[in-house]
C-alpha cells in the first residue's frame, strides 16, 4: 500500500506542532541498563530550550567520544519518557540504514544550537 493510506495524512498544522531543534552533544556515555544497546546523550539546545538528555539506540554507528561536539536534530516538545533509570527528555532523530541501524539526522553545516527546523 502506498499514499496517504499507508502513512496517514498529516496537515501542515500537525507538522508545525513538532518543535524540532538543532543541538550540540556535550556529553555521551554508554547506557548499559537499557534493554537494547543505547547511549545516554546530553545535548545543548541553546538558551531557549536549554540542556536536555536523550537515550538513543545509535551504538552501531556512533561511539560516545565521537559524538561530543556534534550537532544533532531532535524533537524537544514531546513529554519526557522514563527508560529504566534514565529520563529521556527529547527524541533524537535518525533514519534506519539497510541493516536497521540508526544514522543521525544532522544539519548540513554549522547552525546555532537551538535553531528550529524550518
Image (tube, helix red, strand yellow):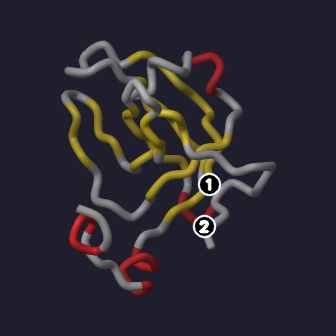
Q: Counting other residues with Cα less than 10 Å from the Cα at mark 1, is it few (<14), some (14-19), or many (20 or more)?
A: many
Residue at the (35%, 19%) spot, across then down: 31
Does residue 33 sit above or below 43 in this rendering? above
Examine the image and state in which quarter residue 26 appears: top right
Residue at the (29%, 52%) spot, across then down: 80
Q: Report whether 5 appears left or right of 68.
A: left
Examine the image and state in which quarter residue 3 appears: bottom left
Q: Position of residue 101 (x, y in %)?
A: 41, 27
Examine the image and state in which quarter residue 24 appears: top right
Q: Which secondary structure, mark 1?
A: strand
Quick one: 9 or 33, which is closer to the camera?
Answer: 9
Does residue 49 sit above or below 10 in this rendering? above
Q: CA distance from mark 1 to mark 2?
A: 8 Å
**Residue for badge 1:** 22
Q: Quadrant of the C terminus?
A: bottom right
Does residue 24 sit above or below 49 in this rendering? above
Q: Counting other residues with Cα less than 10 Å from the Cα at mark 2, is it few (<14), some (14-19), or many (20 or more)?
A: some
**Residue for badge 2:** 117
Asked whether disc 1 touches disc 2, contact meaning CB atoms under 8 Å apart, the reply is yes
Q: Quadrant of the N terminus?
A: bottom left
Q: Report whether 59 appears left or right of 65.
A: left
Q: Report whether 11 appears left or right of 24.
A: left
Quick one: 98 or 39, which is closer to the camera?
Answer: 98
Amino acid at each position: 500500500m502506498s499514499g496517504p493510506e499507508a502513512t496517514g495524512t498529516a496537515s501542515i498544522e500537525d507538522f508545525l506542532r513538532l518543535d524540532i531543534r538543532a543541538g550540540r552533544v556535550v556529553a555521551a556515555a554508554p547506557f548499559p541498563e537499557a534493554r537494547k544497546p543505547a547511549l545516554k546523550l546530553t545535548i545543548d539546545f541553546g538558551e531557549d530550550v536549554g540542556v536536555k538528555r536523550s537515550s538513543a539506540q545509535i551504538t552501531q554507528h556512533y561511539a560516545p567520544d565521537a559524538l561530543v561536539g556534534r550537532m544533532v536534530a531532535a524533537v524537544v516538545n514531546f513529554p519526557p519518557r522514563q527508560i529504566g533509570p534514565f529520563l529521556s527528555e527529547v527524541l533524537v532523530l535518525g533514519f534506519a540504514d539497510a541493516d536497521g541501524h540508526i544514522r543521525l539526522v544532522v544539519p548540513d553545516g554549522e547552525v546555532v544550537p537551538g535553531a528550529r527546523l524550518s
